[in-house]
């Protein structure tokens, strides 16, 4: 479950591609169409926040899904039900909610209503594993924070017998995970950046001191899925999100060009698994 188009590719692209290739049923739920996203390239400067940008970003999502081998992807509540809330910047550099947002912004969504929209999907797809964000949404974006809340609430409600039977038969999710970045991977990125003369990338992060919310000590990462053979899928998916991602930027180049990197996850709820692992499903009895 991700907040905007492109989020699925940046933090879970290789993971999605891997499980699709291995024959797992993978469903992507996107909460908004990214109507307030910052336009990165000059050639798309004509796109303005709102419906036009939403339509463009949905087309990009279609292309990214093809690159990942993903065929089942939906928007929470249907296309356009919840709108990108945008974000402001807090004094510490993290993201935060704007002082003013629209009534249709995902940040202002009724939590129960949004959760029930996800419950119907959970009960229909019956996933063993659900992945979204931590309580801070990795870096504070209000839509990421709301996605965490909706996912957490919906996974509880989905398994309650007799609750809203019109939404389907109860289904209990075996595990939920939060996406993160392992400190070892970040150390590799930072050292590679410095070796290539890039000093502006994560330059103020002291990996031996208190870590920013989107980085987790590697010993606290429960599952790390190596990019491996699916790195090319991740790159192709990110490239498809042209309005938001400049693949010539050092940030994106280093996050994808280093073959040894992986996508990291913390177990939030559910069945414990061997630590560390490279498989979100390790130890679960797989269902058909």
Image: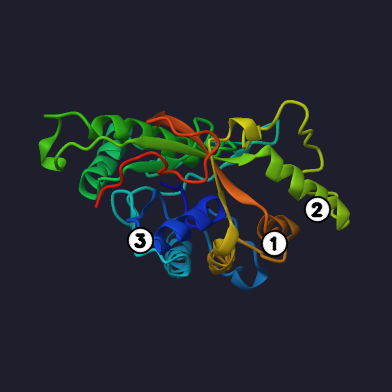
Q: Name the one closer to the observer, 258 or 71.
A: 258
Of the two numbered discs 3 and 2 in the rendering, the one whose residue sits closer to the viewer: 3
CB-based contact (under 8 Å), mark 1 and mark 3? no
- Of helix, strand and loop, which one carries label 1? helix
Q: Name the one closer to the observer, 266 or 22.
A: 22
- Of helix, strand and loop, which one carries label 3? loop
Residue name at image x 82 percent, y 48 percent? 191
- Percent position of residue 249, x then y: 73, 61
Q: Is residue 11 left or right of residue 193?
A: left
Task: Identify the residue position indicated by label 2 in the image.
Answer: 192
- Percent position of residue 231, x then y: 59, 62
CB-based contact (under 8 Å), mark 3 and mark 2? no
Q: Is residue 151 left or right of residue 48?
A: left
Residue name at image x 76 percent, y 33 percent? 207
- Percent position of residue 257, x then y: 69, 62
Marks 1 and 2, the one that precedes in the sequence: 2
Estimate the spatial distance between the alpha carbons at disc 1 and disc 3, rounded to whole Å: 26 Å
- Whether residue 218 appears in this view of the structure is yes
Residue name at image x 11 percent, y 41 percent? 166
Estimate the spatial distance between the alpha carbons at disc 3 and disc 2, rounded to whole Å: 34 Å
Estimate the spatial distance between the alpha carbons at disc 1 and disc 2, rounded to whole Å: 10 Å
Marks 1 and 3, the one that precedes in the sequence: 3
Q: Name the one closer to the observer, 211 or 113.
A: 211
Of the two numbered discs 1 and 3 in the rendering, the one whose residue sits closer to the viewer: 3
- Of helix, strand and loop, which one carries label 2? helix
Task: Identify the residue position indicated by label 1 in the image.
Answer: 257
Task: Identify the residue position indicated by label 3 in the image.
Answer: 23
CB-based contact (under 8 Å), mark 1 and mark 2? no
């Amino acid at each position: 479950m991700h907040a905007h188009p492109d989020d699925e590719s940046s933090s879970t692209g290789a993971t999605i591609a891997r499980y699709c290739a291995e024959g797992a049923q993978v469903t992507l739920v996107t909460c908004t169409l990214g109507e307030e996203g910052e336009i990165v390239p000059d050639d798309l400067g004509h796109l303005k926040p709102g419906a036009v940008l939403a339509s463009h970003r949905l087309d990009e999502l279609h292309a990214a899904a093809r690159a990942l081998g993903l065929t089942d992807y939906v928007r929470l509540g249907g296309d356009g039900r919840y709108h990108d809330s945008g974000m402001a910047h807090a004094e510490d550099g993290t993201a935060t909610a704007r002082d003013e947002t629209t009534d249709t912004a995902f940040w202002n969504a009724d939590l129960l209503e949004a959760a029930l929209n996800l419950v119907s999907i959970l009960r229909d797809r019956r996933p063993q594993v659900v992945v979204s964000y931590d309580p801070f949404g990795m870096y504070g974006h209000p839509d990421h924070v709301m996605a965490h809340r909706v996912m957490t609430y919906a996974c509880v409600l989905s398994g309650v017998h007799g609750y809203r039977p019109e939404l389907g038969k109860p289904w209990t999710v075996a595990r939920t995970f939060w996406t993160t970045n392992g400190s070892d991977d970040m150390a590799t990125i930072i050292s590679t950046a410095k070796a290539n003369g890039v000093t502006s990338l994560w330059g103020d992060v002291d990996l031996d001191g208190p870590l920013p919310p989107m980085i987790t000590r590697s010993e606290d990462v429960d599952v790390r899925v190596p990019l491996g053979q699916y790195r090319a899928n991740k790159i192709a998916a990110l490239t498809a999100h042209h309005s938001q991602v400049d693949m010539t930027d050092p940030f994106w180049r280093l996050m994808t060009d280093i073959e040894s990197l992986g996508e990291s996850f913390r177990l939030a709820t559910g069945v414990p698994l061997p630590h560390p692992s490279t498989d979100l499903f390790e130890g679960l009895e797989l269902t058909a």
